[in-house]
Image: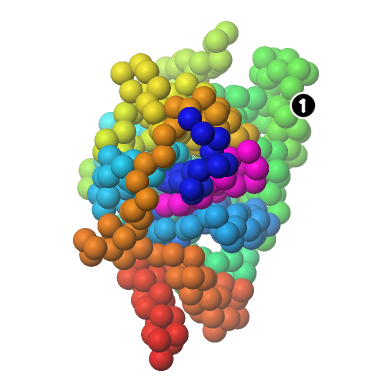
Amino acid sequence: MPDVAETARPLRVAVVGAGPAGIYAADALTSQDAVPVAVDLVDRLPTPFGLVRYGIAPDHLKMRALRETLHHVLDHERVRFVGNVEIGADLGVDELRAHVDAVVYTYGAAGDRALGVPGEDLPGSLAATDVVAWYTGHPDADRARVEQQVSRARDVVVVGVGNVALDVARVLARSPAELHPTDMPQHVLDALAAAPVERITVLGRRGPAQATFTTQELRELGHLAAATVLVDPADLTDVGDVALAAEDRHVARNLAALADYAGHEPVPGTVGVRLRFHARPVRLLGTDRVTGVEVERTTVDADGRAVGTGELDVVPADLVVRSVGYRGHPLPGLPLDGGTVPHEAGRVLRDGAPSRGEYVAGWIKRGPTGVVGTNKHDARETVASLLADVAAGTLAPRGDDDWVDTLRARGGHPVLLSDWRAIDAAEIALGASRGRARTTIHDRGELLAAVRTAAGRLEG
């Protein structure tokens, strides 16, 4: 095979998913000089950035500013953003593969995991993915369902002690003044301002030493303007936790933060945010809707598993939000095993063997673990495998026709970078009209209308 640098055109790679994993993969592909590469960064939504836009809580303004860093990759001359295209529906996996030299799947793991307890399907029970999609303005969010539940939520139970669980608790506990500077859709701000939330209980099935939230997220709860964080001192007396803290500085910092909260008493007029450990839900109570959560006291065994003690009590709840993990969904035409795509160093495996020209990165590769930056190393590993395959001559160039033209010919409406810039400008203008830096446009139709309006101005 001739040196790729001497071929008539650069290697053409489609990256399916324009979240952090996809953008980091595009960056890794275009920032190296050994192999000229042109990247199509494809997303089913009209907007890029994935969980940076629709996963990071809107009140984390500095973290959400990561979009500006990621945007530099979109501006690269050999990267083409193609939004509003769902691979597997608008264009099949095999069709896409026929038009490009390689495909890197980075579409994430956006599904939720169930608790698996009786009553979980009652009205008033939501997944954290539902709530997060709503307050970040995701086009697929079930606005009516979430807002109906939030409007009646005086007592809230959040199941899980990861960062997403704390995000949900914190957003529900924040005052309207604290949320105003965010880019939340206006209808979200209005619904949260009207919500009658008085008490939030965060349940951890194991002890505080096994909680997966970061110390920064934990301490942030203590700075809310209209909330009081409460911890039972008895939850901090486990000898095993003390031993773990001696070995792990992260655990030690978390326990220290929790110890600060253990001295708090409820304050009238503030939202009580109670962090409760060694407590697992065994069923959700209620007939027509959730009225409470039956909780069993647990201990942690030698393997770190929560073991029930048989001691039960009931926590009142008008709203239960489960935050016990994400899982990947299958993409038609792509293998999935246990929520991730089977792979070897990022090479997709079909029937146990590497599939030529198919790669995977991000959560759909390794599962929903790590922070945003973890995707950078993960993407580099995958891209290294792809480039090694190029060097080995296993990636033969395919046809020169453009799959975007094929999509348009069948009535598709891809959103390109200039179109995304029109959406970006519309959100900034909407925010300015309300005294904010930005207001997220949540409706897909309105997002596409911003594109059409900008196009009309250019044509006019």
Estimate the x, y position of residue 60 in percent, counting from the top left: 63, 56
Q: Residue at x 77, y 26 (%)?
A: 249
User: In which image quadrant can residue 93 be found?
Assistant: top left
- Boundaries of the magenta span: 23-42
Quadrant of image for the C terminus: bottom left
Q: Using the rendered image of the protein, determine whether residue 193 is visible from the camera's viewpoint.
A: no
400 is higher (above) or lower (below) than 196: above
Is residue 37 located in the magenta-colored stretch of the structure? yes
Q: Nearer the viewer, residue 31 or 346?
A: 31
At mark 1, the secondary structure is helix
Number of residues whose C-alpha sits closer than 10 Å to that of mark 1, classed few (under 14), some (14–19) or many (20 or more): few
Name the residue located 39 percent from the left edge and 70 percent from the top edge: 447
Residue 95: percent from the left, percent from the top? 27, 44
Q: Residue furthest top?
A: 302
**What residue would you read off at disc 1?**
249
Q: 122 left or right of 262?
A: left
In depth, the one of 200 and 84 nearer the eye is 84
Picture residue at 72% right of the left edge, 29% below the top: 250
Q: Image point 48% across, 30% down: which residue?
A: 1
Residue 68 % position (x, y) = 64, 60
Q: Is residue 369 above or below residue 443?
A: above
**Residue type highlighted by circle 1:** Arg
Front residue of this view, candidates 5 and 287: 5
Is 188 a magenta residue?
A: no
Q: How is the image coloured?
A: rainbow
* Residue 56 visible from this viewpoint: yes
